[in-house]
Amino acid sequence: MKFLLFTFVGVVHLLSTNSGKAIYRNGISQKTFQEIKEEIACYGDVAKAIINLAVYGKAQNRSYERLALLVDTVGPRLSGSKSLEKAIQIMYQNLQEDGLENVHLEPVKIPHWERGEESAVMLEPRNHKMAILGLGSSIGTPPEGITAEVLVVTSFDELQRRAPEARGKIVVYNQPYTNYSSTVQYRVQGAVEAAKVGALASLIRSVASFSIYSPHTGVQEYQDGVPKIPTACITVEDAEMMSRMVSRGNRIVIQLKMGARSYPDADSFNTVAEITGSKYPEQVVLVSGHLDSWDVGQGAMDDGGGAFISWEALSLIKDLARSLSASVFPGCPWQLMKAGPPCRNATGLRPKRTLRLVLWTAEEQGGIGAFQYYQLHKANSSNYSLVMESDSGTFLPSGLQFTGSDKARAIMEEVMSLLKPINITQVFRAGEGTDINFWIQAGVPGASLLDDLHKYFSFHHSHGDTMTVMDPKQMNVAAALWAVVSYVVADMEEMLPRS
């Protein structure tokens, strides 16, 4: 995944200032904020029913068990690989068997890169076999490898200051980890900056908040007009060790071998399923996660968890639609009703607008599948009320991140207040996701799940991203939050207001 820096900003409260003032959609006054607040309050029993089913009822641990079955069966799912396409076909069948509607695959073209055999051996000042992971789209070395002296730097600025020393060497970056969004630039741009000063290859300290000698892979980007050089990540431990060695005056020599190779773009699919809206089926609330992963570990955390709580959100709503009737949810003021019984209509938990699940492909290569989906559907962007993506882990949520107008944020605060039974009600700034950013930039409100990012980046893009990292109880809570938010926004009479 690509990740932006999240900055907490105090929750914006507009209840008193907007109470009694009309919220506008397409320039036409609809409901006052007080009316919307009262409408959302009517969903309290619905939210409790979803929470009870997901956290305490028959559906508890279901998303975890479904995920474990997939990743234990197919393993990691790199863009262009047979394992990714196997996973897509399995999910296509799973969604049909789950009784979801309009299950289909939308064709896309995605990158196909394979790392091949790779190794890095320190030859001087001592013999030491290093753990490495080549970075996505890296070229390989000649068959005999590259053997060269090392230049260790801690920043791009230091590399520029020492540019004459870099020619003909392997640049090793030992940049300190501050946060992911600022530190990841070394992984993404490290090869280009090293090549500009004549380096033969680059090795980047893994972008990780914690390490037990674990290299972390990820995407990197070459630049037109700059020579392409092989590039890989090494462990935090080896980067720090080499930094100590050169500080003592040691000369370090490494032999690097990489069999990495890029192939023509491959055929793949975004996987789509829906619960069709009962009143405004052309309008959409989109919930999503990406099905692809890197080729190490199992891709359970990044982003199996996010994909499967998104599936679970629709499953929970579908299950409750079967078992609950309108009479289960009494108690809303009759004056709020335009027609039908208090708060609920005869369709049970079928929302007014369509809930659409999308499992993206090739997110790790920069949202390739999502971009093609956006190009195909952007003409209907005015019909998207909210786009949601879970791609930062499914540990115990802290709350919801949201990007949208102040009026929409005030509405989302009311929606999140329905999650008081599990004590997760905060709305943070900077809702984002590689796959939904196209829609957010076009003005569609966007939301993402926020949880423990420190733990997340300990396992991110590494061999450690397995089911062992996942916690079924925390996934239950994440799924409940995801289902409540997506359902309520999809079932409210009005779409979320735009800026």
Image: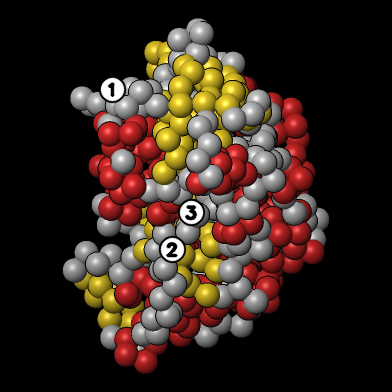
In the displayed structure, would residue 409 be above or below residue 302? below
Task: Report the amino acid beneath label 1.
Answer: Pro
In the displayed structure, would residue 477 be above or below residue 295? below
Task: Report the amino acid beneath label 2.
Answer: Phe
Q: Residue at x 47, y 83 (%)?
A: 38
Q: Residue at x 75, y 32 (%)?
A: 72
SS at mark 2 in the image = loop
Pointer 2 or 3: first along the chain: 2
Left or right: 51 with respect to 342?
A: right
Left or right: 308 with respect to 372?
A: right
Residue toward you, 379 or 184: 184
How packed mark 2 is, by other alpha carbons closer than 10 Å (few <14, some 14-19, many 20 or more), is some
The residue at which mark 2 appears reads as: 6
Is the Cβ of the residue at disc 1 closer than 8 Å to that at disc 3? no
How packed mark 1 is, by other alpha carbons closer than 10 Å (few <14, some 14-19, many 20 or more), is some
| Percent of width and height locating residue 209 | 58, 54
The residue at which mark 3 appears reads as: 176
**Which quadrant of the rendered structure holds the C terminus?**
bottom left
Q: Residue at x 46, y 31 (%)?
A: 150
Q: In the rendering, which numbered label is found on residue 369?
A: none
How packed mark 3 is, by other alpha carbons closer than 10 Å (few <14, some 14-19, many 20 or more), is some
Residue toward you, 390 or 235: 235
Residue toward you, 272 or 347: 272
Pointer 2 or 1: first along the chain: 2
Is the Cβ of the residue at disc 2 closer than 8 Å to that at disc 3? no
Instruction: Say whether residue 78 is visible.
Output: no
| Percent of width and height locating residue 67 | 70, 41
Q: CA distance from mark 2 to mark 1?
A: 34 Å
SS at mark 1 in the image = loop
The residue at which mark 1 appears reads as: 227
